[in-house]
Image: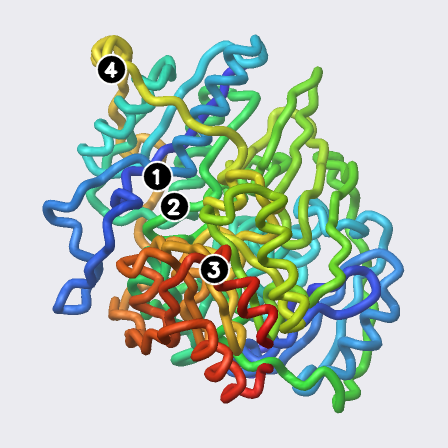
Amino acid sequence: MKALVTVKRVIDYNVKPRVKADGTGVDLANVKMSMNPFDEIAVEEALRQREKGVVTEVVVVSVGPAKAQETLRTALAMGADRAILVSTDDEVEPLAVAKIIKAIADEEQPGLIITGKQAIDDDSNQTGQMIAALLGRGQGTFANEISVEGDAVTVKREVDGGLETVKLVLPAVITADLRLNEPRYASLPNIMKAKSKPLATKTPADYGVDTTPRLKTLKVGEPPVRLAGIKVADVDALVAKLKEMGVA
Amino acid sequence: MTKVLVWVEHDGATVKDATLSAVTAAAQIGDVIALVVGSGVGGVATSAAQIAGVTKVLVADDAIYANALAENVAPLIAGLLGEYDAFVAPATTTGKNVSPRVAALIDVAQVSDILSVEGPRTFTRPIYAGNAIATVESSDAKLVITVRGTAFAKAEATGGSAPVEAVGAGTESGLSTYVGAEIAKLERPELTSAKIIVSGGRALKDAATFEATITPLADKLGAAIGASRAAVDAGYVPNDYQVGQTGKIVAPEIYIAVGISGAIQHLAGMKDSKTIIAINKDEDAPIFQVADIGLVADLFTAVPDLVGKL
């Protein structure tokens, strides 16, 4: 069966985002961009399922600007078989991304769709669930471990109280949490090889999806600044402070 | 008046605190109708009816809702939204699992993790791990929203007396089944509602050292225990201890960060705590930039010393 994995080009997780002075967004000019870390985990999981013989082909998709090609090449260098770029310079909300992925899934008929659980730029945590809704499939969100047996996938999920296990009928949608796996690094030969792997370029219109945002961003501002406090000299001084707060 | 359905988070017996914050947020949007979904949840419905500000309780009590499987629950809510104007859920793992599925079913863009209600359709929400705050306005006919619990005061759990009304159950989706759960039995306060949290980082070395160092301090303070992603990844503690952008968002009265350097992803989960105390031997650790009280010291001597002196 095929696995379809979604990847997003986002600000690198080590970079501290700066809000633009005019309040229109976050300054992304000359900022290091990378694959959303949760999507790397999603790609890795698809590759592992292929190595286990469960998955036969790993197709990666990104909805974003032309530069998202680099992100797709990274996924190809990790080992994905081919890529689809749905090219648009507009900001595309999770709902529209989900509609595009649904259209692609209708064509590709993947047994597994794996997404990162959230993108670290908009922190929405919606796309996987929305894809599952639109396709009428089961969803294994915040996956910590997955195993495919026959026509079902068992998903151990990270939930507030600990871990929960659900069994989903295939095809199904999985969203990757942090501890699903540790993604591999692409080797230099694989990076070279990735350059010749197939990458198709499409547009949202090719899939008949209107990406007009439903949410209008009125302003992007700085969070309230927390001022650094004091340093205490030793444990006794800390105990005194705690006592002042009525704790001890 | 806007009629707002609020997801009641429960464990089958009691209403979870996260619900109370969601009720406060929902009350700023319109009339609050509490929605209790589960199996054998009559008691939960009775409790929900007492939450101050709740005008009505809807109960969908059926075996298919026993474990809040999104595949069964989302169509129920989507159906109710024919009659109601908004769906508000706490941003718990259940809320985050179910809400986007509801939103997609009714073709609405969800507003995730709101921090404030600025107008009938305008909200603020954190982006980039809380390094920026976006003010967004929805243009959809219906609203689907998740609420960051730490950003809203809890509604009073008692004092109300709303009528309870049963709603018909839907059908089993056939897409998913619940297998089981490994839910830790907590002997201490829950992370998201604790007044004091003691949190440990990678510097704690291993699971045994984490336990031996952090637990006595938490016990002494009656605190919940949290951890950085590094400590969870290294296997010192289970995943549900994680505080951060993608773990739990907490805002206790006092947050004590022990051996945590303060990556932005961790700060995103705790920087709204009232008082932050950091113990770290690296005086340049970023955690000191947000800490109200910092102690530059070796945690392996400072923490036991602190426990002894409290």
Q: What whole-number distance in Å separates the C-alpha atoms at marks 4 and 3?
A: 40 Å
Identity of the residue furthest to the left in this view: A30
Q: The disc numbered 4 marks a residue on which chain?
A: A
Circle 4 residue: A191
Q: Position of residue A194 (x, y in %)?
A: 26, 13
Image quadrant holding the C terminus of chain A, namely bottom right
Mark 3 or 1: in front is: 3
Q: Give the residue number, with chain letter if any, for mark 3.
A: B258
Residue type of the residue flagged with mark 3 = Val
Q: Closer to the camera: disc 4 or disc 2?
A: 4
Q: Crowding near pointer 1: few (<14 within 10 Å), some, many (20+)? A: many
Inter-mark Cα distance, 4 to 1: 18 Å
- Give the labeled residue for mark 1: A36
Same chain for mark 4 and mark 3? The answer is no
Circle 3 — which element? Answer: strand
Q: What distance separates the C-alpha of mark 2 from that of mark 1?
A: 6 Å
Could you confirm whether marks 2 and 1 are on the same chain?
yes
- Residues marked 2 and 1 touching at CB (< 8 Å): yes
Query: Cα distance, mark 3 to mark 2?
Result: 28 Å
The image quadrant of residue A101 is top left
Q: Are marks 3 and 2 on the same chain?
A: no
Q: Amino acid at mark 4?
A: Ile
- Of circles 4 and 3, the one toward us is 3
Same chain for mark 4 and mark 1? The answer is: yes
Q: Position of residue B96 (x, y in %)?
A: 56, 54
Which sits in the foreground, A101 or B202?
B202
Respond whether the residues carrying marks 4 and 2 are from the same subunit: yes
Task: State which tag comes first along the sequence, 2 or 1.
Answer: 1
Residue B147 appears in the rendering: yes
- Tell me the element at label 1: loop
